[in-house]
């Protein structure tokens, strides 16, 4: 990449619900020391976001995500593109392709596994050739899971000189709501799955995001049942983002050339508590997760749900974000179970927006400024940024990584 790019970061989608939160984070954390621009399709809306930030010096760029030439021009002007324009399967490909071609680093918030499979297939070699570091899933999915495993494995290695052969992630307390953009992305994924059986087949492979020829291993599909977890002495149910997060964690291990071994196992579930009530809750979550795909696969249900759920641009209130929080626990253990550690990743805002916007902003700054060892390609947060991003999140994003 040319050293003389005009900007360090272009924030694409700054007018959206999450994009405007990322803009606030960049302005409040880096102030005038960051050379960045805000971009979107509507100049008036961009001006309103800039006025709210109180920094009239931020340049504004206008383009449409379907205009490939405009995406190329945008990508060529900056070191990093940070994008919140989703659903990514609908709007994301031209920009990602432009970044891959122009050698521009890129981070996003997609949790759309089918779209990530598509970008890996079509743009991995272009990004490798240009030097562009492309990193999906830089929000609540999947940074706490991916860096949580990275951190737990670092503790294991420091303590015992070897990595864990199995990590169980358990989601503890969390509170927050969903935005219209997230709901739209989930609806698109359900719709594409109901129309294209090959997408469903792809999602049935727990290693579907691994490189070609490396898409198998010891993990099966997520278990849709209530299970009592001996390590945590609590009931657990399926966690709704596990399908994305677990594939990202497995891709991280593969891209780093299997530091945790080819028989490394990972699962992610939600803790509900230890008593009878907790058992019932775990069973209800399990039932919900079994029924949701078939119910939401029906077009008329999606249409009806769309009338009541938040619309694009809407999401949790500032109070809900401020009062929100999340925590995830990790139990890592050696093959024989004799060596183990427990760690925790927690955040002091709601996971989906207050937390996610700061995670994405820090990922963008990390790609722009930190000395990273990976070359071009389609990476995961842990395989591209590892400790550099852990440090930034602890310093600037209200995220704590700790050993218990
Ligand atoms: N990974 C996570 O943990 C996580 C968390 C939160 C959100 N997300 C994802 O982030 C994405 C955004 O969510 P959100 O709630 O912020 O959505 P949103 O409020 O609907 O914002 C979408 C943004 O995309 C822009 N846009 C739409 N079509 C465009 C086009 N053709 N050209 C240029 N810009 C276009 C919109 O511009 P206008 O303002 O002009 O309409 C807006 O800025 C979703 O895919 C969501 O799933 C992920």
Image (spheres, rainbow, N blue to C red):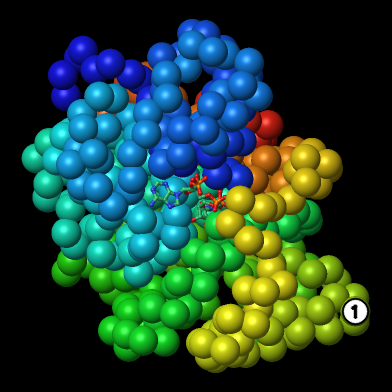
Q: Which residue is mark 1?
A: 277
Query: Exactly how many numbered labels are in the figure?
Result: 1
Write the residue at 67% across / 74% down.
Answer: 307
Task: Point out the image quarter for the N terminus.
Answer: top left
- Mark 1, residues whose alpha carbon is within 10 Å: few (<14), some, or many (≥20)? few
Which element carries disc 1, helix, strand or loop?
helix
Q: Is residue 25 visible?
A: no
Please, is residue 114 above or below residue 157 in the view? below
Write the residue at 72% across / 72% down.
Answer: 308
Task: Point out the image quarter for the C terminus.
Answer: top right
From the top left corner, tell me how far across and down residue 282 is, in percent: 76, 79
From the top left corner, tell me how far across and down residue 170 is, in percent: 66, 61
371 on left or right of 293: left
Q: Residue furthest front?
A: 44
Q: Residue furthest top?
A: 33
Write the residue at 57% across / 89% down.
Answer: 300
From the top left corner, tell me how far across and down residue 370 is, in percent: 37, 21
Image quarter of residue 19: top right
Image quarter of residue 396: top right
User: Front-most of 189 and 264?
Assistant: 189
Q: Mark 1: is the Cβ under 8 angstroms from ligand 1? A: no
Please, is residue 58 above or below residue 158 in the view? above
Please, is residue 104 above or below residue 217 in the view? above
Write the residue at 29% across / 65% down.
Answer: 117
From the top left corner, tell me how far across and down residue 338 is, in percent: 57, 58
180 on left or right of 254: right
């Amino acid at each position: 990449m040319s050293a003389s790019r005009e900007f360090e970061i272009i924030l694409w989608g700054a007018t959206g619900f999450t994009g405007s939160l990322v803009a606030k984070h960049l302005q409040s954390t880096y102030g005038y020391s960051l050379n960045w621009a805000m971009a979107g399709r509507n100049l008036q809306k961009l001006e309103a976001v800039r006025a709210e930030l109180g920094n009239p010096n931020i340049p504004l760029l206008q383009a449409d995500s379907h205009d490939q030439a405009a995406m190329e021009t945008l990508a060529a002007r900056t070191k990093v593109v940070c994008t919140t324009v989703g659903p990514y399967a609908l709007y994301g490909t031209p920009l990602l392709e432009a970044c891959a071609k122009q050698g521009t680093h890129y981070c996003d918030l997609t949790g759309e596994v089918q779209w990530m499979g598509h970008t890996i297939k079509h743009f991995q070699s272009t990004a490798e050739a240009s030097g562009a570091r492309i990193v999906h899933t830089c929000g609540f999915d999947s940074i706490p899971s991916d860096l949580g495993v990275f951190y737990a494995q670092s503790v294991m290695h420091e303590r015992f000189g070897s990595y864990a052969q199995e990590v169980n992630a358990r989601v503890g307390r969390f509170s927050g709501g969903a935005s219209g953009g997230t709901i739209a992305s989930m609806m698109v994924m359900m719709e594409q799955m109901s129309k294209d059986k090959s997408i469903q087949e792809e999602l049935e492979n727990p290693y579907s995001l691994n490189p070609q020829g490396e898409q198998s291993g010891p993990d099966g599909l997520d278990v849709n049942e209530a299970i009592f977890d001996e390590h945590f002495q609590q009931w657990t149910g399926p966690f709704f983002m596990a399908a994305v997060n677990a594939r990202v964690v497995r891709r991280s291990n593969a891209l780093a050339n299997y530091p945790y071994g080819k028989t490394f196992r990972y699962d992610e579930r939600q803790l509900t508590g230890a008593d009878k009530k907790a058992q019932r809750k775990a069973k209800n979550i399990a039932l919900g997760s079994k029924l949701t795909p078939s119910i939401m696969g029906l077009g008329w249900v999606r249409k009806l749900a769309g009338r009541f759920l938040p619309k694009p641009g809407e999401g949790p209130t500032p109070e809900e974000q401020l009062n929100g929080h999340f925590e995830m626990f990790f139990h890592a253990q050696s093959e024989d179970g004799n060596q183990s550690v427990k760690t925790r990743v927690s955040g002091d805002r709601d996971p989906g927006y207050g937390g996610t916007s700061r995670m994405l902003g820090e990922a963008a700054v990390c790609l722009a400024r930190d000395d990273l060892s990976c070359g071009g390609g389609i990476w995961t947060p842990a395989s591209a940024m590892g400790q550099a991003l852990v440090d930034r999140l602890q310093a600037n994003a209200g995220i704590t990584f700790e050993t218990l």
